[in-house]
Amino acid sequence: MDFQENADSKTRRSRGRPRNWDAKTAQNTIKSLDRAMEVFEYLSEAQGKALTAIAGEMGQSPATVYRILVTLEGRGLVEFDPAAQFWHIGPRAFVIGSRFLRRTSLVDRARPILRRLMEETGETANLGIEREGAVLFVSQVETHANIRAFFPPGSLSPMHSSGIGKALLAQMDASRLERFLKTEPLKAFTGRTITDPDALRRDLESVRDRGYAIDDEEKNPGMRCIAAPVFDVNSEAVAGISVSGPTSRIGPHDMVRLSHPVREAARDLTRAIGGAATAPRA
Amino acid sequence: MDFQENADSKTRRSRGRPRNWDAKTAQNTIKSLDRAMEVFEYLSEAQGKALTAIAGEMGQSPATVYRILVTLEGRGLVEFDPAAQFWHIGPRAFVIGSRFLRRTSLVDRARPILRRLMEETGETANLGIEREGAVLFVSQVETHANIRAFFPPGSLSPMHSSGIGKALLAQMDASRLERFLKTEPLKAFTGRTITDPDALRRDLESVRDRGYAIDDEEKNPGMRCIAAPVFDVNSEAVAGISVSGPTSRIGPHDMVRLSHPVREAARDLTRAIGGAATAPRA
DNA sequence: TTGATTTTTTCATATGTTGAAATCTCATTT
DNA sequence: AAATGAGATTTCAACATATGAAAAAATCAA
């Protein structure tokens, strides 16, 4: 289930001879197949491309690229549009790729990433999604420290007073955000909770600028929290990752420091679930 | 958009030498690449498989399969689970495959329409297109209800036993329909699946009269489905929209009731992609 | 019609893939 | 603890086959 961290650590366990994980990994790769997959991947990035264009841009012989495309076409992995003379990704690729999701639950994928995040930062790492206008904490890895932040998985927290919630709100399009503001009262939990819609809008603006959200004792006194969004394949923010800890360990300067591993973890998880972030919302 | 029929007709136009479309197509395919893609596809059908199992079942040398998998792993197209010693489809395959949908704005345009349809009807809303003689589900919005219909995007379903499929078949011109009937066997899935060509022709007739198609437990027992076609700018039926749910919520009377929002959603999407329906086929 | 452009095929050659067998590890049993 | 079995990697030599250059074929534009 957790191949995320194994991939780079030496944890990789298997029977048989261990792979030469130092530089020689390329030893067992099939060159022609790798080149073909490069073409396949390159094609997927374009909205459609002519043979000569692909070959030219990739510095490959047109003959070779042609044969690769014809082969893949035979399996429906790519398609040829005779009218425009363009090659495209085919339906079979979609069918095969979609099977990836059968096995992928966000929570499973997140676990090793959360663990690493906890180890790097020394603080409790959390995963949350949006449910019914609130943040639902679905997974966490607790720090070893005696004073620790704790959200029982399954607990709910209002969007406007949690780091993950604000990271998600910051990615909503304007109309959905306005709908949210109309529906949900911005209840105060501490003196620092943002209860004014305009103040929240401004805060979300800076969340987008920074790339991460901060909960600065806005829900629980003495607790700070740094969060970043996770995107799915449609570039929709579907979850958030955060670290949370006591103000005694997380001071004003620490938030910038902690934001890096948090953002990285969010990016890793985005990648692990086949997602992709786009430019921050317009 | 849909070069579906071009692929089999001789319409294929291109510059350069024409391909030998008779039997010699294999001439330009790269054998090793084709074998590798066979492994890739085979792997996607399993929930995960050990190297030896794959090699054994495919009649290939473990060494070769191993190298193929390692190569694909290098690009994230497959993943290795060290704990279970299993190979799986990887996130990159999902990302690349999903780009198949980008070629058409259909999916993007459909999303808000599907969401509204789901909210109006309370049932799962689906979008499907025809690919390779089957319905390919490309998008859906799930209901909140606990008992729900579920078609994972990327899954395929035979035309004759799905609402969307029949909505599309009903719009085919006679010759294409006959070709379809000659090619595809009408496999039975439940006692209600239409397996007789004449019965199917009659059903499609009434689909045209009504303006919507019904799947009355013809694929999955206990599940009903109401579907309507979506047209492109050439008035060709390129997709179908449906809602599907359990018979406990969708009774005989509900189908008429549900047909209105479904047809409206299909009309909306038709409009959103710049399409137009003409009078039902002559 | 001609010329320019792009795709597809041919062909000789070197490159790279292949499977068998050897090697190595882990997990289980003795 | 050591041995054994099962399965994963790697090595190696043979030879299949992928490769690019160039020719051929077809379409498009003028």
Image (spheres, coloured by chain):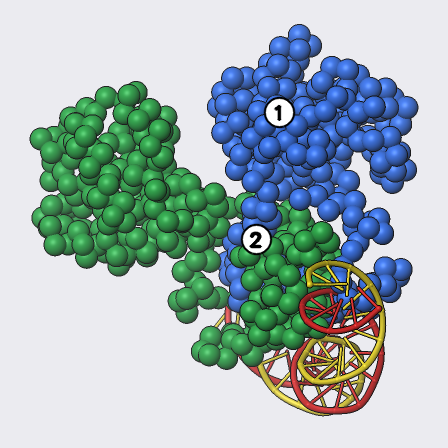
Chain colours: A green, B blue, C red, D yellow
Q: Quadrant of residue B188?
A: top right
Residue A152 vertical position relative to residue A245 in the rendered view, above or below: above
Q: Position of residue A97 (x, y in %)?
A: 59, 50
The N terminus of chain B, quarter of image: top right
Q: Chain of mark 2?
A: A
Q: Which mark is residue B266?
A: 1
Residue A76 vertical position relative to residue A166 in the rendered view, above or below: below
Q: Position of residue B19 (x, y in %)?
A: 82, 63
Q: Quadrant of residue D11?
A: bottom right
- Apparent side of residue B169 relative to residue A281 in the rendered image (left or right): right
- Label 2 amino acid? Gln
**Gap between marks 2 and 1 measured at Cα:** 26 Å
Q: Position of residue B68 (x, y in %)?
A: 64, 68
Residue for badge 2: A47
Q: Is residue B60 visible?
A: no
Residue A99 vertical position relative to residue A43 in the rendered view, above or below: above
